[in-house]
């Protein structure tokens, strides 16, 4: 075997970090686990990259952390679902150009024998009240995520301060919490996307759905370029434009998991 | 700066007697102390057998213990999860997502370390301590006590190292404990959660507790290790 000259070796050693350092920066998107785990982003992002040439790096975390990443300038664009927190975030000057992209919905799932008797109820708050009255086990995300915030609003609507042995704040992601509810025969609130992905492995079923309060709006926001001049603002705006374009909205509406539509696009109205 | 600010808030949290924070710290200690208390006698007996008896498979047992020293916590967590899950063989015990499950995970994690370190300590001890005791007509249990007394510093070092490993372990506790507030949420899982929430102050406060603890444990460890090898 021919020996590689030493200088070549040194050159390669020098080049690797140089290439790594100069690799084209990506548009960094902080979003919730629900958009990523459901497969939506994997489905639509290639089309965006195709038409714009912009690569997107997805950081899927809870809504609280996603907003924090945006406020710290660690990402360029944020796609989350917790309007009250988003409004505060916008008011604090962290972002610009907030657009309503789509909504999906939450469902209350629980053990099929339904010890609290909530099946068939249309009123999500009433169902929560019954769970509390029966002291049936309820697993809360407890992680400040959008789902967690929605859950807390529902408890408030039900006039209940959830506490006690029956209420367990798990502090974990949706998939883990669903698995936990399955193990412990407990109720929980989940977004439909994650539910569909995990359903087959769980001894649980949907007990309450369709309440308007269970709708879950998603907004996209660009990180404020005035606060972080090095944020990829133009790319972020292109992303927002694409997401709310006829093409992007159509792809969101056409996305199916197990033959069910998960997200309803809202940015472009039909006529 | 974010880091400085979060550190400041962390100190305030720690010293203002924040209830949630101290509950988490309490759970961490309760679980890990119990785990090490259960694991130590069994590990000690195992180490004793490995050091004093020659039997077929002893070499294999020793290398197994040494391999398990680098057992990743998540692997322990996953295995335990599958065993304790209601569809698993031990599902009927209903142990998943309880403090007991966390303890089992931590026992498994510190056991190899305890065996390896106390085995080394016993091996290093003069065999003569044992033989002298026996020759002087002491019953075997007295001889064991004499030996234990001889190697006490090595054993304490083993326990400290084992405790250090499990008090900061996150993989297994997260998986089989479930990070349930006021129940199975300990320092490491709380740090993981607070970071994922973007509330860094509480994460840092808990990190301080762990750092402080590690410092104390290391002081103790080096103290006892010095005692193991007497300056002569």
Image (spheres, coloured by chain):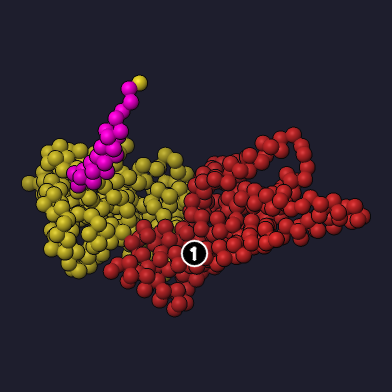
Chain colours: A yellow, B red
The quadrant where residue B205 appears:
bottom left
> What is the residue that sits farthest to the right in this orientation?
B137
Q: Nearer the viewer, residue B70 or A154?
A: B70
Look at the image and tell me in which quarter the N terminus of chain A lies: top left
User: At which x and y percent is residue B202?
Assistant: 40, 67
Which residue sits at x=58%, y=46%? B69
Q: Left or right: A267 with respect to A139?
A: left
Q: Left or right: A118 with respect to A106?
A: right
Q: Nearer the viewer, residue A115 or A108?
A: A108
In the picture shown, does residue A119 fall above or below A3?
below
* Residue A3 on the magenta segment: yes
Q: Nearer the viewer, residue A208 or A51?
A: A51
User: At which x and y percent is residue A88?
Assistant: 22, 67
User: At which x and y percent is residue B32?
Assistant: 58, 60
Which residue sits at x=37%, y=60%? B195
* Residue A20 on the magenta segment: yes
Label 1: how many residues lie within 10 Å, few (<14), some (14-19) or many (20+)?
Answer: some
Residue wearing tag 1: B210
User: At which x and y percent is residue B183?
Assistant: 52, 62
The quadrant where residue A231 appears:
bottom left
In the picture shown, does residue B148 fall above or below A261?
below
Range covered by the magenta-colored residues: A2-25
In the picture shown, does residue A245 fall above or below B169?
above
Q: Left or right: A259 with respect to A87?
A: right
């Amino acid at each position: 075997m021919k020996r590689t000259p030493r200088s070549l070796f040194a050159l390669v050693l020098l080049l690797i970090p140089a290439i790594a350092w100069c690799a084209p920066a990506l548009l960094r998107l902080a979003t919730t686990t629900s958009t990523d785990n459901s497969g939506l982003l994997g489905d639509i992002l290639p089309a965006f990259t195709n038409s714009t040439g912009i690569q997107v790096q997805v950081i899927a975390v809870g809504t609280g952390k996603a907003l924090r990443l945006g406020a710290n300038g660690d990402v360029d664009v944020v796609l989350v679902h917790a309007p009250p927190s988003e409004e505060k975030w916008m008011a604090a000057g962290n972002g610009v150009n907030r657009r309503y992209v789509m909504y999906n919905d939450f469902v209350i799932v629980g053990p099929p024998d339904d010890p609290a008797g909530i099946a068939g109820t249309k009123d999500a708050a009433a169902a929560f009240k019954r769970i509390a009255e029966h002291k049936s086990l309820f697993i809360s995300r407890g992680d400040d995520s959008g789902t967690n915030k929605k859950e807390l609003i529902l408890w408030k609507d039900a006039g209940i301060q959830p506490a006690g042995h029956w209420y367990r704040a798990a502090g974990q992601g949706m998939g883990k919490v669903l698995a936990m509810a399955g193990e412990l025969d407990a109720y929980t609130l989940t977004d439909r996307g994650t539910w569909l992905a995990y359903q087959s492995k769980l001894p649980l079923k949907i007990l309450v759905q369709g309440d308007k309060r269970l709708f879950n709006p998603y907004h996209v926001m660009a990180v404020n370029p005035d606060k972080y001049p090095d944020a990829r603002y133009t790319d972020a705006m292109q992303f927002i434009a694409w997401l709310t374009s006829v093409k992007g909205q159509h792809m969101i509406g056409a996305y199916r998991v197990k033959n069910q539509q998960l997200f309803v696009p809202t940015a472009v109205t039909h006529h | 700066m974010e880091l400085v600010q979060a550190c400041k808030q962390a100190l305030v949290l720690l010293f203002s007697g924040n209830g949630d924070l101290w509950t988490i710290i309490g759970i961490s200690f309760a679980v890990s102390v119990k785990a090490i208390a259960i694991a130590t006698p069994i590990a000690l007996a195992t180490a004793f057998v490995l050091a004093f008896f020659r039997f077929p498979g002893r070499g294999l047992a020793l290398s197994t213990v040494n391999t398990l020293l680098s057992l990743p916590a998540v692997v322990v967590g996953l295995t335990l999860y599958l065993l304790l899950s209601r569809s698993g063989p031990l599902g009927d015990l209903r142990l998943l997502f309880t403090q007991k499950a966390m303890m089992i995970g931590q026992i498994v994690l510190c056991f190899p370390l305890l065996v390896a370190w106390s085995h080394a300590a016993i091996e290093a001890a003069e065999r003569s301590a044992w033989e002298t005791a026996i020759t002087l007509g002491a019953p075997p249990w007295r001889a064991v006590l004499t030996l234990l007394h001889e190697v006490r510093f090595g054993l304490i070092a083993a326990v400290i190292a084992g405790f250090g490993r499990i008090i900061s372990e996150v993989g297994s506790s997260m998986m089989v404990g479930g990070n349930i507030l006021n129940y199975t949420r300990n320092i490491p899982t709380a740090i993981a959660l607070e970071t994922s929430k973007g509330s860094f102050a509480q994460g840092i406060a808990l990190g301080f507790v762990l750092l402080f603890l590690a410092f104390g444990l290391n002081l103790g460890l080096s103290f006892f290790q010095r005692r193991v090898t007497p300056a002569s």
